Image (cartoon, grey):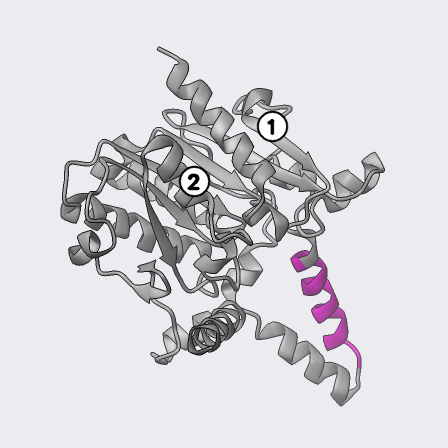
Amino acid sequence: MIARVGRKLEQAIAILNGAVGDHLARSENGLATPLTAVHEGHPLPLARLTDAHPTPSPRVVVLLHGLMCTEDIWTFPDGRDYGRLLAADFGYTPIYLRYNTGLAVQANGFAFARFLDELVARYPVPLEEILLLGYSMGGLVVRNACHFAETEGHAWLSRVKTAFYVATPHRGAPLERAGRVLTRLLATIPDPITRLAADLGDLRSQGIQDLGDPRHPITFLPDIQHYLVAGALANAPWLTELFGDTMVPISSGTDGHRAGPRALPPTNVKVLAGLSHMDLAHHPDVYAQLHEWLRQREATP
């Protein structure tokens, strides 16, 4: 009972951070969530990694959740998750992050890059590989962290061979853009109630606003194998293209992989029918696809 109450409180704080986390950070409010590793719901200082992982592998997978989530979003009904499955099947040590999703994606990317620097420095054994796995906003944070690492010469980047992006809005989320337009319209109406609604709409965090940006400036780094998983709930093709998993359209979740000089090969992109945005964070079909991609990678000389 106590554990369940604690998890509900953590989820409430995660929602608060997603909504106004940038304000919490600016005001140095104690409810602002710093980017940190967690284990079984508790912060895990990198100096104490062996408390959670007594026999750490030279290969780690780092998992980043999405907006208003905690690491619990990864959990299957039976208690497993992608990290534990990757540990059992490929020998990765899973490291789960929790962070303030209300901050700008760029700010979280910078913090994540610094975290990975510290991870390499403090890891109990020499790190051979870092596998990155981002869900929704977490995928955008991964892309930004890799960009910072490339421009600033971070050593950890050379250890990243593969990055998985699950339900990530690479080209923005239309619902956020629609909310932005609605807020502007409400502000033009000479009524105190509608203007109050517009003022409240403007309070949404920078992290939420970043999700609406259709012009993601960060390209996929060519030295990393990037793999994208998107969902599609509707049967009609036009609905699938527009709404995708209900939050992220297919064109955004797949980053328009079908065209362009930097397009990912079709083999690196998977659209799973019948899965919603939330389903994609903890579904056996998603893990089966991640498993297949890793199996193919390891079978290649």
- What residue did someone put label 2 on? 85
273 or 144, which is in the foreground? Answer: 273
Q: CA distance from mark 2 to mark 1?
A: 28 Å
Q: Looking at the picture, how far across and down is residue 149, in whole percent?
A: 29, 40
Mark 2 or mark 1, earlier in chain:
2
Q: Secondary structure at mark 2?
A: helix
Q: Residue at x 25, y 41 (%)?
A: 152
Quadrant for the C terminus in the image: top left
Q: Looking at the picture, how far across and down is residue 207, in whole percent?
A: 50, 61
Horizontal side of 186 relative to 34 (left or right) equals right
- What residue did someone put label 1 on? 257
Q: Looking at the picture, how far across and down is residue 140, in whole percent?
A: 48, 47
Q: Secondary structure at mark 1?
A: loop
Q: Does residue 36 appear in this view?
A: no
**Extreme residue toward the right, this view:** 236
Q: Which mark is residue 135?
A: none
**Extreme residue toward the top, this view:** 301
Q: Residue at x 17, y 57 (%)?
A: 48
Q: Does residue 58 appear in this view?
A: yes
225 or 103, which is in the foreground? Answer: 225
For residue 223, what is the image quadrant?
top left
Q: Is residue 107 above or below residue 268?
A: below
Range shown magenta: 176-189
51 or 175, which is in the foreground? Answer: 51
